[in-house]
Amino acid sequence: MSTEIEIAYRKLKSYVYYDKTDLRLREQLAKFECSDKFEANLEAVQQVADAANPAIDRRFKRWLRQIDCRVVPKKLGPPRSAALAENEATGKFITNVTSAPSVDIETVNYFFDGPIELHLIAVLWLIREGRHLDAKFVPECCGSRLSPKLHEENDYSLQLFTKYHEQYSRWRDSGIRKAKQLLVEEQRNVAILGLDLREYFYRVDLDFGEVREALRAAGSLGGESALLDCIEAIGKAYRTRIAPLLARTHPDLAKSEGGLPIGLCSSLVLANWYLQDFDVAVLKSVRPAYYGRYVDDILLVVPTSQNPNKCDKNPVAAFMNELLVRSHLLKSPVNGVYHLRERPTLQLQQSKCILQYFDARHSIAGLEKFKKKLEQNGSDFLLLPVDEADNSMEDVAYELLYEGSVNKFRSVKGVAENRYELAKHLARQTILHLVTDDPPDRKVSQGLQNFFKGRCAIEYFDLWERVFTLLGIAEDKATAKAFLMQLKAEIRRVRHPDNQVTQELVSNLEQHLKLALALSDSVCKEDIELSDLMEDVPSEEFRRANLLRHHFVKAPLLNFTTYTGPLNERTLKTPARRDRHKLVWTPRFLNFDECMLLAYSGNVQLGKATPFDFACSVFEAANRHAPTGVTWVDGGDMADLIEEGGRV
């Protein structure tokens, strides 16, 4: 088999493995790898990619016909209680009841759903050509950047994109640090402007002829770009598939706008390329103290001598007119909507723009508090504070919204769910059960059932998997079964103004529920007897392809062996053997200390090898190179591991 397609598949698998949201693509990848024709299917992709004109290959055309889409909720309609709460003439009405006869969906998102072969074509395009586009992007383009390893001559790594959290933190924190520097060190007033491009991926009107010229200018093409033809064909086929639904849900989109498929990795690089001229123009014309763009989110930090709120006009409109309209980056707004001058299909809504102004002569406590909160949140998921471990769901999942003093009852204007705190709470409780083997906490179980009702059940559908994992590891069968039945009932209440869109939403949410259950079931200690309540739950495929969540495997690298029992057990009754397929096609890098822990765990048969030699062979099989800087020192009864001059 070709080395190139192996590398492409391993990069795609790692990319999917670390994604927390697209469970459908994870399922497709697991079934693709578990197929008896796995290697033959990989070879077919390589043959198509190497063809003189792959876009007309019959196999490629067959893959195009399999393109579909997933429809997921983006924004729920406001509850009736919200309208009552805002009507000051009739008094305030605040309630914690989220259940209703129907859960109304206001807006939806579409995600690409196509065969794995097309995802591999997209990865091959990134490896061969897309990386040359990415190399030309300015550093201020922070999101969805390709890994620098793709530019190395012999890249056998798993990395496709740079780590999400590192990119996001750089984009967000750099702007805040720059604003503080201007305020404190230079005593200059600062404006921070946040912009969000409306429905960006749907409104990109990409000219692939321009992309080809850019690739030629970058020196990556001698002639026509064969794989780029495939990317263009995939986009057209996908747009044709979703066009009837888009006409119902996004009627203001022009039919001529091609858009980019959300969920196809090549779209991320093309989305960045589409705005690269805008990035350069902002840096040249506006010359902000800081500019950063994270895909379609834009942040500017600008020193300013004048308070935007001192004029009689709307301060946001006045500031944007001075900064971006007068510099010919945006057209004058029409009904509060700005269009990019060079990319007129792209829109900025004034109502979604956020302008913060800080005067150096006044307190910057708000900026300081925000900065400290960002730093604290960076490590929250890695910590398990004892003083917070016993907090109830009600303590963490909800927060009161105030208008005025927090000490006055009349200041309360509502109750809101706190997604971030809820996710942290689920992570803490799961780790707690994983390391202590405590029995199920009925207070936690009841809190979960109370929270995931009505609107909350649908709005937080991305957290279903975490709940099932917590209940599975805690061996709370009763709550898990009740939670499953509760979610199935809530899904049936989902409504969109268009009946066809409603059917698509219900179908995709039901599929997501099945996959959330499957991922939990692939690691949990015991069968919690939910598989019988849903058909075709692919737990076994997730496990065989090693696409489960490795954080919940108690014994290091147990999921890389032939062991078929529960993966959240510490010790096995009988040792297993290492699984060569799982090592060769690992979705993540294996650290040497993990390999040593596996060798010494007693969970795996070593044969005639020493633990050190066994660990080295496991490391090399997974990472495609031998461990470096590691030597074995025999100290009699004790053996010490020396790595790069230090003891481990």
Image (tube, helix red, strand yellow):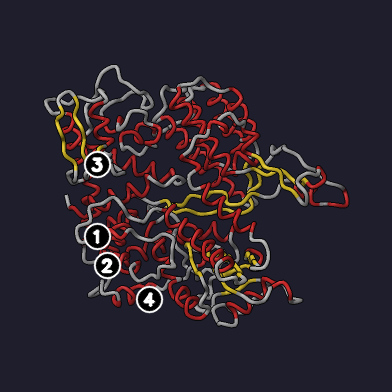
Tags 4 and 1 in contact by the CB under 8 Å rule? no
Nearest the viewer among 239 and 159 is 159
* Amino acid at pointer 2: Ala
The residue sitting at the right extreme is 89
Which comes sooner in the sequence, label 2 or label 4?
4
Circle on res. 49: 1
Above or below: residue 450 compared with residue 88: above
Q: How far is mark 3 from mark 2, CA to CA?
A: 50 Å
Residue at point 33% right, 68% down? 135
Q: Is residue 492 visible?
A: no
Which comes sooner in the sequence, label 4 or label 1?
1
Q: Is residue 153 visible?
A: yes
Point out the frontmost of discs 1 and 3. Answer: 3
Q: Which residue is mark 2?
A: 226
Q: How far is mark 2 from mark 1, CA to CA?
A: 8 Å
Tags 1 and 3 in contact by the CB under 8 Å rule? no
Nearest the viewer among 334 and 146 is 146
Tags 2 and 1 in contact by the CB under 8 Å rule? yes
Q: How far is mark 4 from mark 3, CA to CA?
A: 53 Å
User: In what quadrant of the picture does the C terminus appear?
Assistant: top left
Circle on res. 210: 4
Residue at point 64% right, 57% down? 366
Point out the frontmost of discs 4 and 3. Answer: 3
Above or below: residue 619 compared with residue 378: above
Horizontal side of residue 599 vs 424, given as left or right: left
Q: How far is mark 4 from mark 1, CA to CA?
A: 22 Å
Q: How far is mark 2 from mark 4, CA to CA?
A: 15 Å
* Amino acid at pointer 1: Ala
Q: Which residue is mark 3?
A: 646
Q: Secondary structure at mark 2?
A: helix
Point out the frontmost of discs 3 and 2. Answer: 3
